[in-house]
Amino acid sequence: MALTFELVTPEASAATINATMVVVPGAEGDMGVLEDHAPTVSSLRPGVVSVNGTDGGDTGYFVAGGFAEITGERCVILAESATALSDLTAEAAQAAMTEAKAALDTATSEGEKNAAERKLAIAEAMVEAVAG
């Protein structure tokens, strides 16, 4: 039994994988998706999308947020941005954290503060993803 997993960012289609299971970081908590899942649309929080491939390989992607569209045959992730976990380093995650904290410290308007808080939430999730 399998479903098709697709990861799409504004830049490109990042991945298409035949999967036995996908775990997505839903806004209300992690959600496991198997074949014949009930149709669902969910917003995503920053976190890791885990894909168990039909070939036995497991793949992970860090997403900065977005939406999941799930049917019985497919799980499509429309992500703001996505990075393969294998490409994510602790140094990059810490740099994102430092940059986000600096942006929050220098924010002068409510809009800048909101954007900096969003960056900080993404950076914190990235650090957690790298830590495992």
Image (spheres, helix red, strand yellow):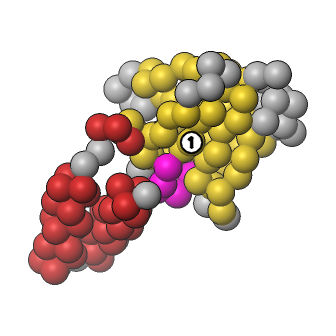
Q: Is residue 40 left or right of residue 57?
A: right
Is residue 128 visible in the rendered image? The answer is yes
Q: Is residue 44 magenta?
A: yes
Residue appearing at x 67%, y 31% in the figure: 75
| Residue situated in front as seen by the camera: 91 or 116 | 91
Q: Give the quarter of the figure containing the N terminus.
A: top right
Above-or-below relation of 70 to 18: below
| Residue situated in front as seen by the camera: 41 or 114 | 41
> Quadrant of residue 108 in the image?
bottom left
Residue appearing at x 48%, y 54% in the figure: 47
Q: Is residue 44 left or right of residue 42?
A: left
Above-or-below relation of 78 to 24: above
Residue appearing at x 39%, y 22% in the figure: 12
User: Magenta region: which residues?
Assistant: 43-48
Is residue 107 visible in the rendered image? The answer is no
Q: Is residue 59 magenta?
A: no
Badge 1 crowding class, 10 Å Cα cut-off, few under 14, some 14 to 19, many 20 or more, is: some
Question: As shown in the figure, which amino acid type bears the numbered disc 1?
Answer: Ser
